[in-house]
Image: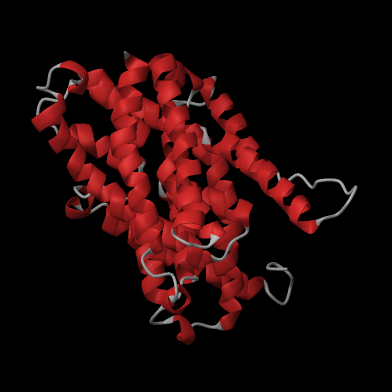
Amino acid sequence: MPFSPQNRKGTLSGILFVAIFSAAATFIADLNAIKSLGLSPLVIGIVLGIFYANTLHNNTPKEWQSGITFSAKKILRFAIVFYGFRITFQEIAEVGMEGFLVSLIMLTSTLILGSWAGYKLFGMEKDTSILTASGAAVCGAAAVLATEPVLKSEEYKAAIAVSMVVLFGTVSMFLYPVLYTTLFEHATGFLHMTAREFGIYVGGTIHEVAQVVAVPASIPNASKEMADAAVIVKMTRVIMIAPMLIVLGLYLGYVAKKEGGAAGGKMKLVIPWFAVYFILVAGFNSLHLVPQYIVDIINEIDTFLLTMAMTALGMGTIFAKFKGLGLAPIYTAAAMFGWLVVGGFVVTKLVCA
């Protein structure tokens, strides 16, 4: 037990150690040069954590490991629950059925495509395939973090997924403004996209929330309608983390029973309750009972807790464990990226027609 009398001091020291790294990540992410790249503290945190894991890891007291693990597992779930304060059901209603359908179609198709391509087509391990797909399908690093405890996978697998999200999410952030200004804005017929359509397209297909915000900001004279549609559709995808994880948990329970061959045995339901609590918090936030300035403070604290979880995850990532993976993660992420860019455009146009 991490907080048993004999482990308590080491656990607290480990949590403090992760918090110091996370504070550094938060400071770095706030620098203008980093902000311009759309890199969140979560991404900076995992980079710092990975650097530590592969350089200073052996010089840290072993007693601290329980605190690092606690940050990567328990603090993570708490932070995902309070992520619900970033969303209201009213925001989802504002973007209408079109935004909801684009979010639902792109999330479902990307998750299935990525999981299948990684595991069946490119020979990647199943957990890593699902984690990589969840990051692309929902909301980047935060989705990987939320999916990891459901799969009960090793830390380095989530780190691989996050690295793919960062790579292709960054490419998206620079590609989409170019696509809009040189093609979609001035095209005629099917290729033309209105500001609202492009906003729905951006929100429905780009990985990280920060990257979604950055795209309209990078387009000269982009309308508020474009920016609002992008963010709201993105947050619609975010709230879909909860049902996605519940369905995934049920699927894993079914697979476990099937592979176990327990004739007549009951299927154990793997329900991630933190995802259910996430929906409840979002519902509570929709009532607007808490003053906005307090919600802003909660979100700042929550971002720091998520950064702690990501940093701790990075601290468990040792490059030696990556041997044998080859280029499979890149091929898998590239396949999903192609679907998000091309398939997402077609889906958006058909839904918004």
Picture layout, residue 146 above or below residue 69: above
Across and down, in percent, residue 194 comes to: 21, 18
In this view, which residue lies farthest toward the right? Answer: 264
Q: Residue at x 44, y 76 (%)?
A: 323
In the foreground, 48 or 205: 205
In this view, which residue lies farthest toward the front? Answer: 121
In the foreground, 186 or 33: 186
Q: Quadrant of residue 213?
A: top left
Answer yes or no: is residue 105 visible.
yes
Q: Residue at x 72, y 77 (%)?
A: 6
Picture layout, residue 100 above or below residue 41: above
Picture layout, residue 56 above or below residue 162: below
**What is the total number of numbered labels drawn onto the structure image?**
0
Across and down, in percent, residue 79 comes to: 53, 47
Instruction: Identify the image's colour scheme: rainbow, by chain, secondary structure or one colour.
Output: secondary structure
Across and down, in percent, residue 239 comes to: 50, 32
Q: Residue at x 74, y 56 (%)?
A: 259
Q: Residue at x 55, y 49 (%)?
A: 147
In the foreground, 172 or 288: 172
Q: Quadrant of residue 348?
A: top left
Picture layout, residue 217 above or below residue 41: above
Answer yes or no: is residue 86 visible.
no
Quarter of the image where the C terminus is located: top left
Across and down, in percent, residue 128 comes to: 50, 59
Q: Is residue 3 left or right of residue 96?
A: right
Q: Is residue 263 left or right of residue 237?
A: right
In this view, which residue lies farthest toward the bottom? Answer: 59
Quarter of the image where the N terminus is located: bottom right
Q: Is residue 1 left or right of residue 76?
A: right
